[in-house]
Image (cartoon, grey):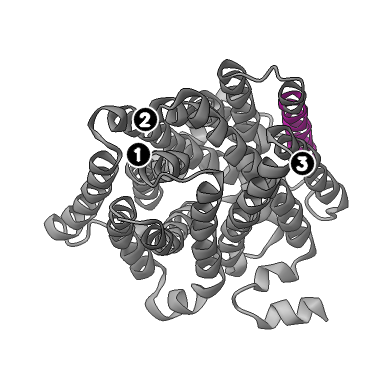
Amino acid sequence: MATSLFSRSGSARALSHRDFTLLWLGTLVSNIGTWMESVALGVYVTQVTGQAAWTGGVAALTHLPSLVLAPLGGALADRFDRRTFMAVCVCMQALLAALLTVLAGTDNLSVPWVAVLSLLNGAFSTLVIPCATALTVAVVPPEDLHNALSLDSAQFNLGRIIGPVLAALVLTRVGIEGALFVNTLSFLAVLLALAGMRGAASTLPPKVEALWDGIMRGVRLAWTDPGIALALGSGALVGLLISPFVGLVPVFALKVLGGDATTTSMLLTAQGTGAVIAAFGSGALVARMGRRAFLESALLLVGLCSAAYWLSPSLPVALVTLFILGAVYLVAFTGLKTVCQARTPPELQARVSSLFLLLVNAGYILGVWGQGALSDRVGVRPITAGCALLFFGIVVGMRTLRARGLAALGT
């Protein structure tokens, strides 16, 4: 009954595939815990240091390992049993979360500890993400790929909604160690989901090529395919100029709006809500406008929406603008990821996914740290809103100076 219901629903038809549903639910639970930890650590670092540069720097450390490990993770995920590979990485993430919990519970937590463990967690997360994307592509048919990737983004943002709300409750009643403990337990959901999957245990035959040769095959495809190359470059620019709003939410909530952990939770929840609604509701617009036109519109709007958020004069206005930004941001990233995966042969999908992760995170690392550091000197609003308007100008320039500048994004 549930399967037929999802099959009839264009907004959630990928959930008619059992393995995808298990992976989706397990990752959702884990993401709720991850967002609880993210809010807890972001508030902790902001309160202890009082500096946007520290908050942005610690957020950047989570993504720093992708600059080295993303291509390796993609090649390994295309080489080995993806479920086993992902399970090992998730176990290591659970151990790191448990160590954070112990440090907080014994009053030994410090900003250096947060930085080191964020770096290590980022390393294993870098290995997990391309593997999870490749598993998703393997368990849904091509016609459901865009829907599956949209639902992946939806579950990530459902975690963004539920996680910060739970974090605010736990932080005020139990303390930081409570939020970190819940995150530790949440990784069990992913392990149970992987154990229950039937059809994705060995999605590809073992590879006999050298690891470096495997990495370079993915790089060559990305370099020579104009659609993949443009999608990767666009993702890097979004990461550099737009994505830092995610890591700097605690700074905006505490230093600009004069709020607290609850304010941070409210802002993250607003963004997540917008993203979830977009994920479930964008299917009809994609069908009407076409994937390329829909993606181009999202890329044009995301800069304007980001600038409007950073210039918000009050919390209510910030909540509304961040809700809209969350929706447009999801559509833009889902569209870019779909271009990459739809144009890639199955045996290279994890590698191309890892390159997307590499470039987006490289942009985000430079952006969140750089914008945070400059904000301490110049002010939060001028720097962040200026970057958002710069992105808008770049997209307008591509469309104006080269009429077919974004045409390669067609799939």
Residue furthest out toward the left = 401
What element does badge 1 sit on? helix
Measuring from the top left, give residue 397's x and y in whole percent.
Answer: 16, 53
Q: Nearer the viewer, mark 1 or mark 3?
A: 3
Task: List x then y, in percent, for residue 7.
Answer: 70, 79
Residue 18 point in image, percent of width and height: 79, 64
Q: Residue at x 71, y 50 (%)?
A: 27
The answer to whether residue 92 is magenta is yes
Residue 40's disc number: none
Q: Is 389 drawn above or below residue 236 in the view shown?
A: below
Q: Which mark is residue 366?
A: 2
SS label for mark 2: helix
Tell me where the magenta segment starts and ends, as one range. Answer: 84-100
Q: Which residue is mark 3?
A: 182
Q: Secondary structure at mark 3?
A: helix
Mark 3 or 2, nearer chain start: 3
Q: Residue at label 1?
A: 240
Total tally of numbered discs in the picture: 3
What amino acid is labelled 3 in the image?
Answer: Val
Q: Give the alpha-carbon distance from disc 3 to disc 2, as whole Å.
A: 30 Å
Tell me the CA gap for discs 1 and 2: 6 Å
Mark 2 Cα shell of 10 Å, populated few (<14), some (14-19), many (≥20): some
The quarter in which the N terminus is drawn is bottom right
